[in-house]
Amino acid sequence: MPLTINGTDHDFTGDPRTTLLDFLREDCGLTGTKKGCDHGQCGACTVLVNGQRINSCLTLAVMHEGDEVTTIEDFGTAEELHPLQAAFVRHDGYQCGYCTPGQICSAKAMLDEAASGWASFVSEDLSAPGRLTPEEIRERMSGNLCRCGAYSNIVDAITEVLEAGR
Amino acid sequence: MTRSLTMDEPDERNRLDAMAQGVIGKPLDRPEGPLKVSGSATYAAEYRYKIPGCVEGVLVTATIARGEVTLLDESSVRDLPGFIAVISDERMIARPAQGGAGESPVRKVREVQYYGQPIALVVAETFEQARHAAKHLKVEYREEPDALVDPADERATFEPFEDPTIQGDLEGSMRQAAHAVDVIYTTEGHNSAAMEPHASIAQWDGETLTLYSSLQMLRFNRKELADALGIEPEKVHLLSPYVGGGFGSKLGISPEGVAAAVAAIRLGRPVRVVMLRQQVFQCVMRRSETRQRLRLAADAEGRLIGFGHEAWVSNLPEEEFAEPVLQASEFLYPGENRVLDLQLARVHRVTAGSVRAPGEAVGMQALEAAMDELAEASGIDPVELRLRNIPERHPSEDIPYSSRKLEECLRSGAERFGWDKGPRRPCQRREGEWWIGSGMATATRVHNLNEAHARVTLRGDGTAEVASDMTDIGTGTYAVLGQIAAEMLGLDPAAVDVKLGDTAFPPGSGSGGSWGASSTGSAVFEACEGIREELARKLGCAEAGLTLKDGHAVSGNRKVPLADLLEGRDVEEIGHFKPGKIAEAFAAAMYGAFFTEVAVNAYSGEVRIRRFTGAFSLGRVLNEKTATSQCMGGMVWGIGSALTEDLVFDPRDGHIVNPDLAEYHLPVNLDVPHLDVLLVEERDPAGSPLQSKGVGELGICGAAGAIANAIYNACGVRPRSFPITPDKLLPGLPEV
């Protein structure tokens, strides 16, 4: 069964019980995507499927025929960081680093969602959510737990990238 | 060469401030940051991809509270695809090791002592197959009826865990007091909930075991694992270069590591065991629930004349740990009439052990909430009340305090927050459906040091390497050890490689109890002192006259590039740091103050944290960026402890009702306002040769108390029961 991961063609032939997360980590060796709970509760496994964020532990690999999956490995390398990755380093938007790839994938998709006019729980006007305030960022990033408690710095990092893009 | 430094007295030399490089304390980015944000830092479970033939194990856990496993029916799973083995071996451990144990915890996996205890490991070719087989393994038990699982059960008996402190006449002082508070506070169980579940991969090479694992204190873990397996510690090689959070839960080895090692030797294949998130809750460790009685007796000016803090906690039989609830109460406040008494009950619930800031995390939040009650009773501003109660000497041991900047923290925190010193009454401010209030609390955490070794190599090319089996669990160890070496050796921190988390390196202190940076950092410091002496010899000057800066050695009017001075030869030193008599000579601790503004919904009782300021004094700050982040992390934990975190145990069999991240509620991003952290300048010569103390836990110690006090100030309800969930506020909320 064909699918594309980070622009490369892959073929999934494994156990149908395999989650997309385990396929990425165990079969493709893309261990940047993390397993924190395996139940869609922590967000550490967040990846993009056709540009939208998804908990890759909550979906089976076999459900993604023909899909384009993007993982943290597609953002940038340690030597050449994506602006979001660089901002996370600069603002110390992580400590242990385990939730971080998921936070960054989530942030990327979240910025795209907001740019497309999607509202959130804290948006005053559902039809015109307007500017992405820190409060909006906090709400939209609340699916990604960080037990080290780097939330303030994560918001600062995302805000910096957002403002650089304006 | 090994150089030893035993700290028997304060180190007044303050060598770091005399160095020339100027990088110590600077808010540098973590050197391992690019690896973490790009997903290329490798955590324990992720080595599987690099180990051919590695098979998967999934733990099977008990579904009774107490009894004996009478049957593990292998025939029930033997025919499942990929099945390899069911292993239930006398070497496997039934509980995690307590922090610093250095020996195997209780084994006897077939003798069930708590619901969720590991009883076997099922191994299969793949994770999916192993999980399926583990789920379908037929198990039979002989169950002991009526296991005592609940400390609130009337059959539970509490016994003193250690000798209580009893001074003077507390009851008399309570009667004489102008203002007195006698209250009971409770806190519920907590789980560390590090984002990376406990994971191990075991691989044997003859009689030598290599274990990739997620651990905090390798030099102890090596002994624990060796003891469980019945082999020599030298035959165990542990690797934990990256640890996805620990918070105490990885201080000791946990069941998955020993199970992987046993399975790997029995099967002759590498084996990986990763705990399911539910297992992290069920069979690692919990912070004990606490019941605390606080008695505060003050004179007319609010000065404490009597101080009582008693606490009741629980643990499994045979465990030598009781949540040290009274740790800060020993030294924080005066009161010549004192009772401090910690009582422990034995119950059949998952092991109680260290969870971030054991003791102060829950002791301080109750104490600081009670202090708020005393402030109200006496009509004294809460900040002022605390300023009036800073004792001259340790109230029980009559020893001096080391550097203590509590007053500075209280004053600078109050100023930064904009604390209103006016009269305080609840229910004074409402914005729409939200009651708004403010609260404050003191922070303190005892300062600990631990023995540590580290090797520093100044390479012939003028770059350096620091190596220790010390870990970085998100605490910034890679950054701060590099900065210490860079400062001492006059190097750009980018020219210092820090290698950690490998027992092939000299044994560090491990990460725990906030001692990591000061202890292992002091070992790095001592090694650098040796290297400096060698460089001075080479240069032909006294060490005191040697300046190292930007890769050059300078003495008088001579300036020589290090690479030239070294002539291509490495200089290597191992630093050995030992905490000596200093620990008994001073009451050393970190201090701080929290200020917060909360909103309480007048109809639903929902609490939102609107502002949260923390002012902290931690001795010398080694890296302002990572220290600030650690303080923020603690404050986030304070929010969880105040509002949501609550392990719920079934009173019938002691099973955890909410063993996952959907039902055990950590604070999420929206629960946390932009945290405001202020680091107060301090050098503590009794803290360490670096003049530093600990950072990682202070931010939680008292934080939840400030929130509780703000909730009371907002809406006039003081539940005296943490977490303060809406159901506890609703009955008392005023009409609007």
Image (cartoon, rainbow, N blue to C red):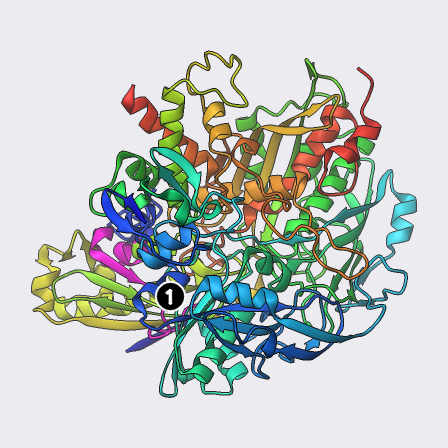
SS for dot 1:
loop
Give how far across and how far down residue A131 sits, in percent.
Answer: 41, 16
Quarter of the image for the C terminus of chain B: give it: top right
Pick whichever, B265 or B391, lies toward us.
B265
Say which amino acid is labelled 1.
Gly
Q: Nearer the viewer, residue B240 or B653?
A: B653
x, y (%) of residue B112?
A: 71, 74
Looking at the rendering, which quadrant does residue A83 occupy? top left
Out of B475 and B255, give the one closest to the viewer.
Answer: B255
**Visible residue check, residue B624:** no
> Residue B124: percent from the left, percent from the top?
47, 71
Question: What residue is drawn where x is 17% and y is 51%?
Answer: B550
Q: Is residue B185 left or right of residue B268?
A: right
**Is residue A86 something one can see in this rendering?**
yes
Up-down relation of residue B416 to residue B503 (above or below): above
Q: Quadrant of the N terminus of chain B?
A: bottom left
Residue B667 sits in quarter = top right
The reply to whether the magenta stretch includes residue B493 is yes
Magenta span contains residue B35: no
Up-down relation of residue B83 to residue A116 (above or below): below
The residue that disc 1 covers is: B501
Residue at (54% x, 31% y) in the render: B670
Q: Please, which chain is the residue tagged with disc 1 on?
A: B
- Does residue B695 appear to the left or right of B491 in the view shown? right
Q: Which residues are magenta?
A: B483-508
